[in-house]
Amino acid sequence: RLVISTSMAAITYVDVYAAKIGMIGNAKTQGFSDPLKVCCGYHVNYDHVWCGTKALVNGSAVFGASCESPSTSISWDGVHYSQAANQWVANHILNGSLTDPPIPITQACQRH
């Protein structure tokens, strides 16, 4: 029914969960640093100062700043993926390596 009502559409399936798990599991070979390390914020032991905020930790003022190399981080703030990680996923979707059928988006959108 969907195919009939959208006969002009090109539908491509992407398993983004599998893509991100693959990126995390192969972080080093994909150019990322420690996949479990958060780029923005202060997270040491059980002390958490969230990105862009200030707090007292053991009597010292601490600012939750960004890391020096956000382009090598997968996690921005422990909740959101970094721009670099999202770009990695987008590039792999566009080149077809994460899609079903596995073809570049430029070919998937051509009318046959």
Image (tube, grey):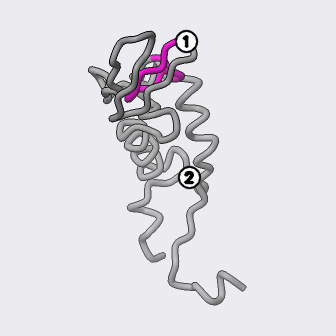
Residue 56 counted in the magenta span:
no
The number of discs equals 2
Q: Which residue is rendered at x = 40% and y = 37% of the image?
A: 82
Kind of residue at badge 2: Thr
Query: Percent position (x, y) of residue 108?
Result: 47, 64
Q: Secondary structure at mark 1?
A: loop
What is the chief secondary structure element of the magenta stretch? loop
- Mark in front: 1 vs 2: 1
Q: Is residue 28 above or below residue 93?
A: above
Q: Which mark is residue 45?
A: 1
Query: Percent position (x, y) of residue 24?
Result: 55, 28
Give residue 40's quadrant in the image. Answer: top left
Query: Percent position (x, y) of residue 90?
Result: 42, 48
Query: Percent position (x, y) of residue 61?
Result: 33, 18
- Residue at far left of view: 68
Residue 35 counted in the magenta span:
yes
The residue that label 2 is drawn on is 99
Sequence-wise, the earlier of marks 1 and 2 is: 1
Q: Is residue 63 above or below residue 3?
A: above
| Span highlighted in magenta in the image | 34-44
Q: Which residue is rendered at x = 72% and y = 85% of the image?
A: 1
Q: Nearer the viewer, residue 1 or 53?
A: 53
